Amino acid sequence: MALPSTKCLDHIIYLTPPGSVNETAEEFRKLGFNVLPGGQHADALTENSLIILGDGVYLELISFMKPVDAYPPDSPERLARENHPWALKAPGWIDYSFLGINSETVHIFDIINSRAKEGGDDDLYGPEIPGGRKRPDGQVVKWVITPPRRPAEGIERRLPLPFFCGDVTPRNLRVPTDPPAIIEHSCTAQGIASVRFEVPSGRWDELSRCLGYVVGNPGVASADAGHEWILDTVKGVEGRDCRLLLSRSEKESLGIVEVAFYVKRKPEKETIETPYAQIRFVPI
């Protein structure tokens, strides 16, 4: 039996300050994106809005509903908020997801951990965790998350590996594309051209090796960055690749620094700084 793909980009996450997701949605609308209301997540800690692209990838604009100090000390809600994987993240491009599966017999974590063991490394992923949210129309959407393991040294040492999102309910409930106007954007965005990471030299070998285990191949040298991988998307942009790029950095922090979009119309400005991150338009 063929193993499922472990290199299909599902969505990219843009964190905004607590309670500000609607304000951020307006900022992206001004950039020419069609932004849809998302809803509140099942943990009651976060809410989101969505930008769905023609290649099947979407942007998740997300914020915590309240700051940490809004919860009573030592309450279960406070502890959940403090221990959320994104609790210490600064606003901007903070995470990304590959498309997972919902299966009782085949597991993403088994596939990737097996590759890591063959390469002499420890397990990278833990077992599935249920997730979901309620849409504004009342529709309940369910999925399972396959998360990267938290390093023993602390969450701040976690490599920027994708988590996997496998649909329990149909994907079109989570990522609606009907009517077609949902994926039409005045900026003419068609899909993701690239997701660029900056990586300090001291962690370069570790991250590139582990991304190789995730994607299933070691990648290649890149003219636009130090290294790159070609990713799948659900539908793709005809004749164009979706690339994951690694660039070396002198900074100690590592993570996504830019998301680039294929667009049909040449923009006035190809690179735009949002309040917390950078986006780039690539004419096709």
Image (spheres, rainbow, N blue to C red):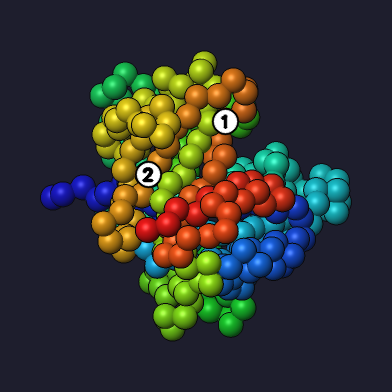
Q: Is residue 139 visible?
A: yes
Question: Does the residue at mark 2 contact the one at mark 1 (Cβ under 8 Å)?
Answer: no
- Circle 2: is it few (<14), some (14-19), or many (20+) Cα within 10 Å? some
Q: Which residue is mark 2?
A: 243
Residue 190 horizontal/vertical position (percent): 41, 64
Side (left or right) of 134 relative to 125: right
Residue for point 47% across, 68% down: 188
Side (left or right) of 39 relative to 105: right
- Circle 1: is it few (<14), some (14-19), or many (20+) Cα within 10 Å? many
Helix, strand or loop status at disc 2:
strand
Residue 100 horizontal/vertical position (percent): 37, 53
Q: Which mark is residue 162?
A: none
Residue for point 59% across, 20% down: 250
Task: Tell me the quarter of the image containing the C terminus.
Answer: bottom left
Instruction: Give the tally of numbered discs.
Output: 2
Q: Quadrant of residue 192?
A: bottom left
Q: Is residue 87 above or below residue 184?
A: above
Residue 54 horizontal/vertical position (percent): 40, 67
Residue for point 36% across, 49% down: 242
Along the line of sight, which residue is nearer the eye, 172 or 43?
172
Q: Which residue is mark 1?
A: 254
Mark 2 / mark 1, whichever is N-terminal: 2
Along the line of sight, which residue is nearer the eye, 252 or 157?
252
The kind of residue on which mark 2 rests is Arg
Q: Is residue 261 above or below residue 214?
A: below
Along the line of sight, which residue is nearer the eye, 12 or 278?
278
Q: Is residue 126 visible?
A: no
Residue for point 48% across, 50% down: 260
Mark 2 or 1, closer to the camera: 2
